[in-house]
Image (spheres, helix red, strand yellow):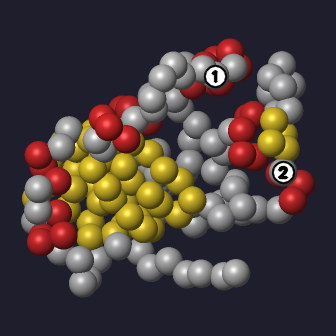
């Protein structure tokens, strides 16, 4: 089965390269593309956060990436692609919860979006507490170590 996605917007950011850390220091904008405009963003400013779905359009996929040590660190276990959040993914989709800083016309200003300048955005959704995890959340210690400087 094949499908296609059309971008609804594009990321504007000072970052041109996909670096691994310090994404919370980055403020980005998402400029909507036609036919999406101001009407598509009505009410989004009432939410503190939004979910941004984007395409890692500069990343590549090949089956040798099916499993690996996160960030190539041999001190961390080898894990499958679906047990990590690397950018080199089978369908190259990224999903990030961002803080909404402002909505102005057909542009959203966000904080914490780990996407580089020019990245195509394929969807934007408001973050609602009710869609967050239910019950306790657990994760391996290597992932906590990996993420310590990410945000």
Q: Are marks 2 and 1 in contact (CB under 8 Å)?
A: no
Location of residue 79 with respect to 89 vertically, above or below? above
Q: Position of residue 122 (x, y in %)?
A: 42, 68
- SS category of the residue bearing label 1: loop
Residue positioned 45% across, 29% down in the render: 134
Q: Position of residue 83 (x, y in %)?
A: 72, 38
| Residue bearing the label numbered 2 | 66
Q: Nearer the viewer, mark 2 or mark 1?
A: 1
Q: Residues within 10 Å of mark 1 (few under 14, many from 20)?
A: few
Q: CA distance from mark 2 to mark 1?
A: 20 Å
Which of the image's four quarters has the N terminus? bottom right
Which of the image's four quarters has the C terminus? top left
Closer to the N terminus: mark 2 or mark 1?
Answer: 2
| Residue bearing the label numbered 1 | 139
Q: Residue 57, located in which quarter of the rendered image?
A: bottom right
Q: Position of residue 64 (x, y in %)?
A: 89, 54
Q: Position of residue 145 (x, y in %)?
A: 64, 17
Q: Residues within 10 Å of mark 2 (few under 14, many from 20)?
A: some
Residue positioned 81% across, 36% down in the render: 79
Evaluate whether residue 90 shows in this view.
yes
- 79 displayed left or right of 57: right
- 41 displayed left or right of 16: left
């Amino acid at each position: 089965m094949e499908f296609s996605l059309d971008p609804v917007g594009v990321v504007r950011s000072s970052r041109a390269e996909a670096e691994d850390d310090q994404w919370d220091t980055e403020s980005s904008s998402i400029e909507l593309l036609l036919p999406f405009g101001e009407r598509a963003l009505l009410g989004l400013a009432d939410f503190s956060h939004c979910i941004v779905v984007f395409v890692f359009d500069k990343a590549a996929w090949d089956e040798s990436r099916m499993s690996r040590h996160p960030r190539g660190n041999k001190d961390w276990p080898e894990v499958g692609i679906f047990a990590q959040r690397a950018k080199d993914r089978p369908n190259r989709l990224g999903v990030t919860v961002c803080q909404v800083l402002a909505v102005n016309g057909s542009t959203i200003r966000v904080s914490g979006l780990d996407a580089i300048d020019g990245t195509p955005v394929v969807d934007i959704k408001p973050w609602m507490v009710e869609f967050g995890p239910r019950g306790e959340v657990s994760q391996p210690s290597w992932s906590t170590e990996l993420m310590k400087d990410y945000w």
